[in-house]
Image: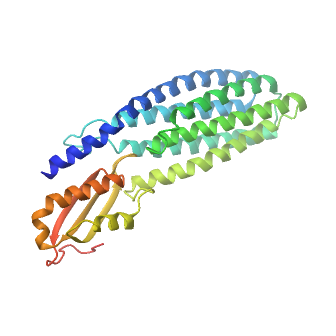
Amino acid sequence: MSGHDHLHAHGHHHHDHAPKLDHLNTAFIVGIILNSVFVIVEAVAGFITHSLSLLTDAGHNLSDVASLALALLAFKLSKVSANRQYTYGYKRSTIIVSFFNAIILFVAVGFIVYEAIVRFMNPEVISGGTMAWVAFIGIGINAFTAWLFVKDKDTDLNVKGAYLHMAVDAIVSFGVVVSGIIIYFTKIYWIDSVVSLIIGVVILRGTWSLLKDSLRLEMDGVPAELNLEKIKTELMKCKGVVDVHHMHVWALSTTENALTAHLVIKPEAMAEFDNIKHDLRHRLEHLDISHSTFEPEFADEKCQQPECL
């Protein structure tokens, strides 16, 4: 019965998201195509104008394309059904991807900082006008791509990652436009390096939280948006449940959470266990936990396992 219940509840849960998935799929693909084309344009322009900040931005945009492709892959994999080896399917790949995504960005920043320092020592002549125009196009492309993800950004860590990248990139491109204009009028070429370094700092700030969140999920930590006490309180509200212990909450993917718990139940409520489970599953779905497993115990027996939470 409970298995059927679970499937039913779960099927229903996914049904709600069906339109979102197509929309996200399209957003990823459009984002990947637009940004790939722009990376080429920007890299060529960077070489022609000798602008490090353009090349940096192209590199950063390339890491964006990689992160979008990875997020799309994770998104597809999270839909693959479970098998005997992987009883949860490949949902966890979404967490691994967001972790790698953060690492890629850290590496990119390392290159930027190194190159900016080298350039600072030996400034090169840069054509600021062209630089400003190319970066101006970048603002449009990045802002548009960020907008594609804006409404789904809080549903999935990877979508949030993609959104952050794009939003940061739009700001970055704006910085490059400003520095291009200044260089065009003043011929102070080291401004290019300074802008590259500022870009680096901006990227690091966003990446740090992405790294922290994905590492927490990787280590089966309780997802940031969930609160154990609140979940326990909610479970205790159910009629017939005397106590809850051995509660474990973890993330199956960047969008789905799971819970296991021992329930201490009044002996007379045992016949109602199916209803209790049904009620609890319903409560948990509202708290964003889609997979749950409960083990019943009678109020008059002692829990066999140590370390009862």
Q: Quadrant of residue 80?
A: top left
Looking at the picture, tell me which residue is in the foreground, 285 or 191: 285
Residue at image position (85%, 28%) is 184
Residue at image position (68%, 38%) is 171
**Total marks placed:** 0
Residue at image position (64%, 40%) is 111
Q: Give how far across and how far down residue 280 sits, in percent.
A: 25, 59
Question: Does residue 159 show up?
Answer: yes
In the image, farthest residue toward the front = 239
Residue at image position (60%, 32%) is 61
Looking at the picture, tell me which residue is in the foreground, 236 or 73: 236
Q: Quadrant of the C terminus?
A: bottom left
Q: Give how far across and how far down residue 219 sits, in percent.
A: 39, 56
Q: Give how far across and how far down residue 254 sits, in percent.
A: 40, 46
154 is higher (above) or lower (below) than 124:
below
Question: Is 78 positioned to the left or the right of 38 in the image?
Answer: left
Q: Quadrant of residue 71?
A: top left
Q: Give how far across and how far down residue 92 sits, in percent.
A: 35, 45
